Image (cartoon, rainbow, N blue to C red):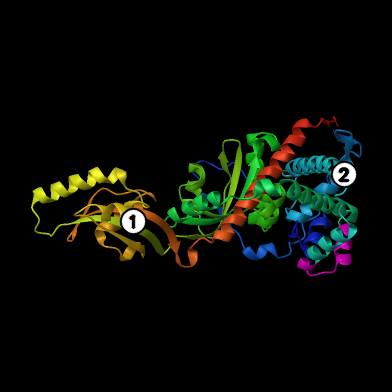
Amino acid sequence: MRLMRYMTSVAMVALMAGSAVAQTAPQPTPQTAPAAAGSLNPAAEQAPAQAPAAAPEFQLSDGVLATVNDSVITGFDLRQRMLLLIAMTQVQPTQENLPAISRQALNNLIDERLQLQELANYKDLRVSDQEVDEEIGAMAQEAGITAQDYLRFLEQGGIRPQTLREQIRTQIGWQQLVGGRFQSRARVSRSAVDAAMRQLNEAASKKQYLIGEIYLEASRVGGQQAAVNGANQLVQQMVQGAPFQAVAQQFSAAPSGPRGGDAGWVVEGTVQPALQAALDQLAVGQLSRPIPVEGGVYILYMRDKRDGAAVNLVQLKQVMIELPETASPDQVAAANTRLEALKPQLTCDTMLARATSEQGLLGSDLGESDVANLAPQFQQVARSAEVGSVSSPVRTPLGLHLLAVCGRRAGGPQAPDVRAVENQLFRQNLATLGRRYMRDLRDDALIEYKQQ
């Protein structure tokens, strides 16, 4: 089980040594500004951050800040979670971004309280200390230190080890609950996999972008302007070295958030126009400026891009009437009329049988071919016609043809894998069901915020 393993030992020490450092907040991005805010160094996911300059610590009351049903959240709880969030993301705390960090940490605490209350209803679902220890050990191993040193770094930064243990225990339990409760509903039907494969193969010749995404939902961060301001702060921090994956995992409301913002390959024309405009401008390794959309703000990271599959394979069947190049216009017109009348009656399944049952028709299965290797007259149909459709008559030196496109897929190393597509759809379904579960818990809960 992989939870949040993006912080390093040195980064924790550096980030926890101080509490807040004043920096100049970025100004709202003009509409005419370039899409890119800067380039990211992939090595930043593993590299330690530099220690911030000393600055006044943020102050929080130790009283009750909020209640979630019968569970209280105190100022101490919030401070602990803010420190842990800063350590996880390596975002340098500033006077400008502390309110956003505080809001995100409070949202996380509220969700965690709701999850704990729901987990209490399942007496047989208990996360052992060993499971928590194993996860901490795995996190420490990725940081290149021992679990004991890992927890000691937390303490040096003012974070109780119990804070991390409680968070991990809840995350493991929640993942087990969601997986156990919704696994059967998240299963992917064969028809859904086939449909996804068709879409991928249809899009194989289009431009594709491997992207990371962060989505700040306006309703969760205090409104659209707060989302824009927060996104500007995050962009500045990531350009300065905060790891994209860690920031996405802590701040993003997109389904890809738990995976570090990994949105996979995105096909040209399948995203909102504002996002497509940014994708067209970003170079590999560049981070976008905040992109406002209805309901929130996106930040995109261009991990890679490609022009599409080099090999596009298509399955064709045909019915034809032989006509030499010397055929008269009347002969061509007669053949065209006959094929047009026959066309509505043909499918990929019936085409060959129908051709053999009528005199003067020839039918053949052309098999699967690279579009580039087909006769020039066939290539347009092979590239653009919908799978399962039958073309209008196509003239070649051999005669007049009706072509049925019976399948299309990408070839070569970029060809989609059925098992990978099925697994991705399953994860998406499970994530969607988990988000609905949390939304229902929030809707049914009594959440009160105390005035400070």
Residue 146 placement, left or right of 347: right
Give the residues drawn in magenta, as a range.
Answer: 141-156
Q: Nearer the viewer, residue 2 or 328?
A: 328
Q: Quadrant of residue 112?
A: top right
Residue 118 is at least partly visible in this image: yes
Q: Which residue is mark 1?
A: 382
The three-letter code of the residue at mark 1 reads Ala
The residue that appears at 88% across and 40% down in the rendered structure is: 75
The residue that appears at 85% across and 69% down in the rendered structure is: 146
Q: What is the x, y in percent for residue 410?
A: 44, 61
Label 2: how many Cα within 10 Å (few below 14, some 14–19, many 20+) = some
Q: Is residue 151 one of those drawn in magenta? A: yes
Say which quadrant the N terminus sits in.
bottom right
Mark 2 element type: helix
Mark 1 element type: helix
Q: Which residue is mark 2?
A: 77
